[in-house]
Image: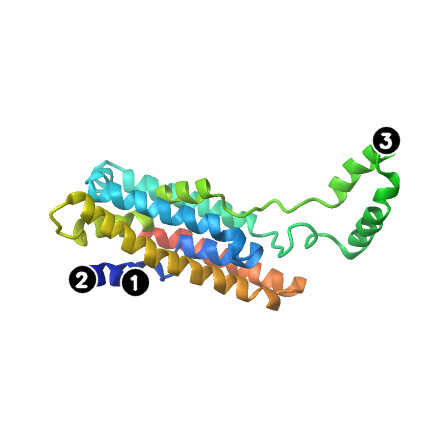
Amino acid sequence: MEIIFTIASFAFATTFTPGPNNVLLLSSGLRFGFVKTLAHIAGIQCGVATQLVLSALGFGILLMSLPFAEIALKVLGTCYLTYLAWNMRRFSLNENSANEKPKEALLKSRFISFRPAIRGLKALEIFKPRLKQSFPNSQTKPFRFSQAWLFQFVNPKAWMLTITAGSLFLPDFSSKSLSIATLCIVFIFVGTFSSCCWTVLGASIRHFLQTRFWQNCFSGLMITITLYTAVAIWFF
């Protein structure tokens, strides 16, 4: 029981602190809400669990012993976080209408109100391309499960914490499988709680950012934090 408390304490300290995953979850919770971020949360936990298994079997230390492996991971993580920060420059709470200008939104609403009357007409095909051009959907979408899972393998912080956990906090049970399973279960439990807290934090401040001014302010803040995280991973 003592070893489980020790693992949970380490997991709490490493998963609740700001990092690439928590920054992305905060942003996703704000933009898309808690429910649409569940796949992102699940992908993170499964990715970390996969890394824990690999680390407990010795593959993590083997990977870090390869020449330039750690540098390569940090370069990939930095590039990906920079790419995400670039995409955050067009912040919107509503995928369909936050980027629309008031006049364009009014025209769109009028077009939709007359849509049943012109349904089936060939003239509708003329308006569709223009409609898509005038009212583009947001370029950003919530992370899919596979995206969040794969991101862990270029996340230096995730590698550092899983290698440390797999080498220093692996329970000394009679069964190796039981030891690895215990480590993964505790980490997934604590990690899921941490991820949900960061996502709820983002979702809970949505109503404070209903104006374009505050959306731009938050967008700038998130870009700054993401770029800071991209630099900070070099010190993990």
User: What separation in Å lies between label 1 and label 3 (alpha carbons)?
Assistant: 61 Å
Q: Are marks 1 and 3 in contact (CB under 8 Å)?
A: no
Residue visible at 12% across and 51% down?
A: 172
Does residue 25 appear to the left or right of 125 in the view shown?
A: left
Does residue 37 appear to the left or right of 124 in the view shown?
A: left
Question: Residue 141's spot in the image, x, y percent?
Answer: 56, 46
Q: Are marks 1 and 2 in contact (CB under 8 Å)?
A: no
Does residue 217 appear to the left or right of 76 in the view shown?
A: right
Element on which disc 3 rests: loop
Residue visible at 46% across and 58% down?
A: 225
Residue visible at 23% across and 58% down?
A: 7
Disc 3 residue type (three-letter): Lys
Disc 2 residue type (three-letter): Met
Residue 13 has which mark?
Answer: 1
Q: Between disc 1 and disc 3, whose residue precedes? A: 1
Element on which disc 2 rests: loop
Q: Between disc 3 and disc 2, whose residue precedes? A: 2
Query: Disc 3 marks which residue?
Result: 122
Does residue 80 appear to the left or right of 126 in the view shown?
A: left
Vertical arrangement, residue 23 with respect to residue 137, above or below: below
In terms of image quadrants, where is residue 153? top left
Local crowd at mark 1 within 10 Å, few (<14), some, or many (≥20)? few
Query: Disc 2 marks which residue?
Result: 1
Check the picture and name the quadrant holding the N terminus.
bottom left
In the image, which is nearer the foreground, mark 3 or mark 2?
Answer: 2
Question: Residue 98's spot in the image, x, y percent?
Answer: 68, 55
User: What separation in Å lies between label 3 and label 2 (alpha carbons)?
Assistant: 71 Å
